[in-house]
Image (spheres, rainbow, N blue to C red):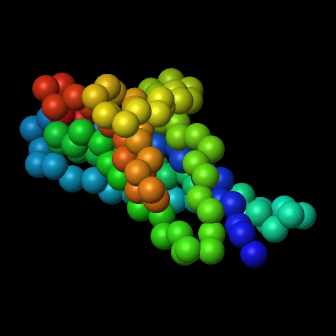
Amino acid sequence: MKWTILVTLFVVFGAPEAAAQPRALRWTRLAVAAHLDAEGRLHVEERQSIVFNGDWNGAERDFRVSLDHEFNLDRISRIDESGGLVPLQKSDSLDGVDEFGLFGSLLRWRSRLPDDPPF
């Protein structure tokens, strides 16, 4: 049986006081909701709240997908300072802020440019 996994990620970036601190990251929340539809497709939504301190350019998430499964990414967004959703744009180069790339089952996204101030 083929399963389709639809994933929605919401990522929060913060900690503006971190410029003088060493690089660190931590999860303040990880919530997962899943629904198996009538055709046997599993729909999964992940909500991750990640705090980056320091000079992180972005992050990555590797999804373990077996050979008899199919993986589809629905969307990835981040939450801005006002609580609004900012959709990330798909890119193979990841040259700009708020871009993501999906390389097989590896998801990478860019949160800042290398010359931008640290979080």
- How many callouts does the rendering have? 0
- Of 88 and 18, which appears nearest the observer? 88
* Residue drawn 17% across the image and 40% down it: 55
Horizontal side, residue 91 vs residue 2: left or right: left
- Of 68 and 58, which appears nearest the observer? 68
Quarter of the image with the N terminus is bottom right
Give the image quarter of residue 46: bottom right
- Of 97 and 72, which appears nearest the observer? 72
* Residue drawn 62% across the image and 74% down it: 68
Query: Compared to 79, does 31 lie above or below?
Result: below
Q: Can the viewer see residue 79 in this picture?
A: no
Q: Can the viewer see residue 110 in this picture?
A: yes
Give the image quarter of residue 118: top left
Residue 99 at x, y percent in the picture: 40, 32
Give the image quarter of residue 31: bottom right
* Residue drawn 13% across the image and 26% down it: 115
Residue 112 at x, y percent in the picture: 27, 31
Query: Compared to 10, does 45 lie above or below?
Result: below
Horizontal side, residue 115 vs residue 51: left or right: left
Quarter of the image with the C terminus is top left
Residue 48 at x, y percent in the picture: 49, 52
In the rendered image, the residue lying farthest to the right is 38
Residue 26 at x, y percent in the picture: 33, 56
Query: Compared to 67, does 56 lie above or below?
Result: above
* Residue drawn 72% across the image and 69% down it: 2
